[in-house]
Amino acid sequence: MTAVRRCLSSGLVQAFLVLVGLIWLTPLAGLFLSSLRSSEDTAEGGWWTSFAHPGQLSFDNYSALLRNTGMTHAFWNTVLISVPTTVLVVVIAALAGYAFAWLDFRGRDAVFLVVVALLVVPVQIGLLPVAKLFGQVGLFGSIPGVVLFHVAYGLPFAVFLLRNYFAEMPKEMLEAARMDGGGEWRIFYQLVLPVARPAIASLAIFQFLWVWNDMLVALLFADSDSQPLTVALQSQIRQFGSNIDVLAPGAFLSLIVPLVVFFAFQKHFVQGVMAGSVK
């Protein structure tokens, strides 16, 4: 480990990592600069020409985007889909993961095997049957229907992840809490959840990013009134072709929100990824 740390701290390695980071950030910078240019300027040259002509850059496209009721409505639809889905998946998975890890009930192992088996079921298999079911119960084309589908397909991985994390907790810690008179609910809320905060934060980030960037499920299950931003942008491409003055700021807005969420919870995310790697 000492040799690895010494290698990573060398100037050459750090310069290489900075170079890789700049390469990864280049598309993001290009999208941002494109969102600040008019469609006429974009037709005349690439986004890099704005360095020589900074007068091309303005926030007029964002002002027009905020006045576009269809795009703003799609943005709030994305929020109404992503946030409830993430909360429901995390809450249900935490409860189920604790039950599978520390509660002894009949058929526990068999049910957990079913949950694990669901991990290999691709989303595409369930699209048409679930769409037919949602049509019969009145959920097709609505935000609750999209949320319910994402929750159902996000739970197997979430339960599997948190169950394995909970199972690694010291058994003596929970037994001591029970000997002190703590009930299962109190142990779960006051002991297990605080300890598992890094894993829960990592799961929340993954789930939020997955749902926020989804287009396949929303394209099938959401109608025009409940479509998220990804579907709205795809519709703009289909209808108007090269309207970069709408697509560029909309795409950057769709991209910047997940980035803000990731960097806001970066500390917990790293702790969750590294959990269990160092004894």
Image: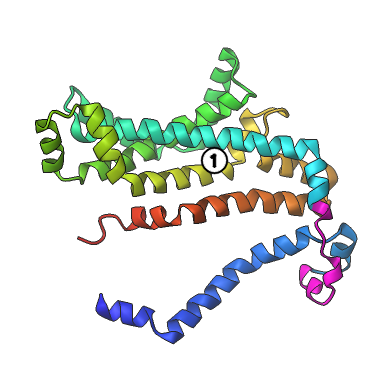
Left or right, 80 with respect to 183, comes to right
Is 116 part of what is drawn in magenta? no
Q: As drawn, is 154 to the left or to the right of 234? A: left
Picture quarter with the C terminus = bottom left
Q: Residue at x 81, y 49 (%)?
A: 63
Q: Residues within 10 Å of mark 1 (few under 14, many from 20)?
A: many
Magenta residues span: 47-61
Going 65% across and 48% down the picture, which residue do you hit? Answer: 254
**Image quarter for residue 172?**
top left
Mark 1 lies on a secondary structure that is helix
Instruction: State the image coordinates of residue 165 (x, y, percent, origin top left).
Output: 27, 45
Residue 204: percent from left, percent from top:
44, 43
User: Compared with residue 55, is residue 13 higher up or lower down, i.e. above or below?
Assistant: below
Q: Amino acid at mark 1?
A: Val
Q: Residue at x 57, y 43 (%)?
A: 212
Where residue 84 sits: x, y (%)? 52, 32
Q: Choose between 85 and 127: the one closer to the eye.
A: 85
Q: Is residue 26 left or right of residue 203?
A: right
Residue 125 visible in the shown view = no
Magenta part, dominant SS: helix
The image quarter containing residue 166 is top left
Can you identify the residue that label 1 sits on?
Answer: 211
Residue 101 horizontal side relative to residue 204, left or right: left
